[in-house]
């Protein structure tokens, strides 16, 4: 049964209203926000960190931060953008605390377009997804975060720029450099065909959460 607050059920309330209600003391509003967006935030954390335990901890920290910071939400961006920003920052904080430094042994002389498969073989989709995830952990965090949002989560460049709080041109540059750095790591996929971005390699493994 829907819980009514101010004449409108929690389930039917827009995200910004839920965040406002939570800041005003509504005990159910934040739980509804978490239910709505947990899967997508989990996908961002997992693909950014590449480790389930690390991603789970980062997501927990992110939602705790969002819970505490709700009263400071200015409303000038979508709640999802605000949440994504908190999740990405939580991932970066974990990397910094654990002194994890991605290895970047290759140059920028190729593009992911030349190696990503256009029609992945379903029987090897899981292995392919693991290859892409492993490769992502070996490029700089800033490039990885941009690629996760744009190529894997389907964000427009302008929206990804809002999440990461950088100009759209910076997102384009990070994506281009990230794809170039991924190419040598995914060179063994060359014989499987060509595709357009990181997402095309992931799609064989299922629809993103």
Image (cartoon, helix red, strand yellow):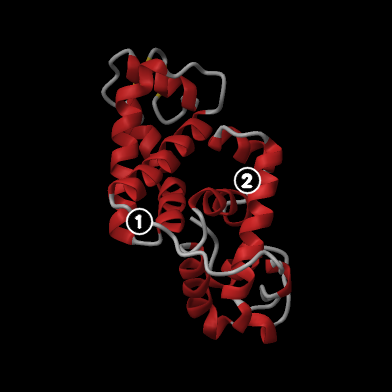
Residue found at x 29% / y 39%? 61
Q: How many discs appear?
A: 2
Q: Which residue is mark 1?
A: 100
Tell me the quarter of the image containing the N terminus.
top left
Residue drawn at 35 percent across, 56 percent down: 100
Q: Indicate the position of residue 85 as horizontal and vertical percent values.
A: 47, 36
Q: Is residue 150 left or right of residue 50?
A: right
Q: Secondary structure at mark 2?
A: loop
Image vertical order of residue 182 relative to residue 151, above or below: below
Label whose residue precedes the other's in the sequence (2 or 1): 1
The numbered mark at residue 155 is 2
Q: Secondary structure at mark 1?
A: loop
Q: Position of residue 99 (x, y in %)?
A: 32, 52
Q: Is residue 60 visible?
A: yes
Residue 3 showing in the rendered view: no
Residue in view at x 55 percent, y 36 percent:
163
State the image quarter where residue 92 is shown. top left
Q: Residues within 10 Å of mark 2 (few under 14, many from 20)?
A: some
Q: Residue at x 69, y 77 (%)?
A: 119
Image position, residue 115 (x, y; %): 68, 75
């Amino acid at each position: 049964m829907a819980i009514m607050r101010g004449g409108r059920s929690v389930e039917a309330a827009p995200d910004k209203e839920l965040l406002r209600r939570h800041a005003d003391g509504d005990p159910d509003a934040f739980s509804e926000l978490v239910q709505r967006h947990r899967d997508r935030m989990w996908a961002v954390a997992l693909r950014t960190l590449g480790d389930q335990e690390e991603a789970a901890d980062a997501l927990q920290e992110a939602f705790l931060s969002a819970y505490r910071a709700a009263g400071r939400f200015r409303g000038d961006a979508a709640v999802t953008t605000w949440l994504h920003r908190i999740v990405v920052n939580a991932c970066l904080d974990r990397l910094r605390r654990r002194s994890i430094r991605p290895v970047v042994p290759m140059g920028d002389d190729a593009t992911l377009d030349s190696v990503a498969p256009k029609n992945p073989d379903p029987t090897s989709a899981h292995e392919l997804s693991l290859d892409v995830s492993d490769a992502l952990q070996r490029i700089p965090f800033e490039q990885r975060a941009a690629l996760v949002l744009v190529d894997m989560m389907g964000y427009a460049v302008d929206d990804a720029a809002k999440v990461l709080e950088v100009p759209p041109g910076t997102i384009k540059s990070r994506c281009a450099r990230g794809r170039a750095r991924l190419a040598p790591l995914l060179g063994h996929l060359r014989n499987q065909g060509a595709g357009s971005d990181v997402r095309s390699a992931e799609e064989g493994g299922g629809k993103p959460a």
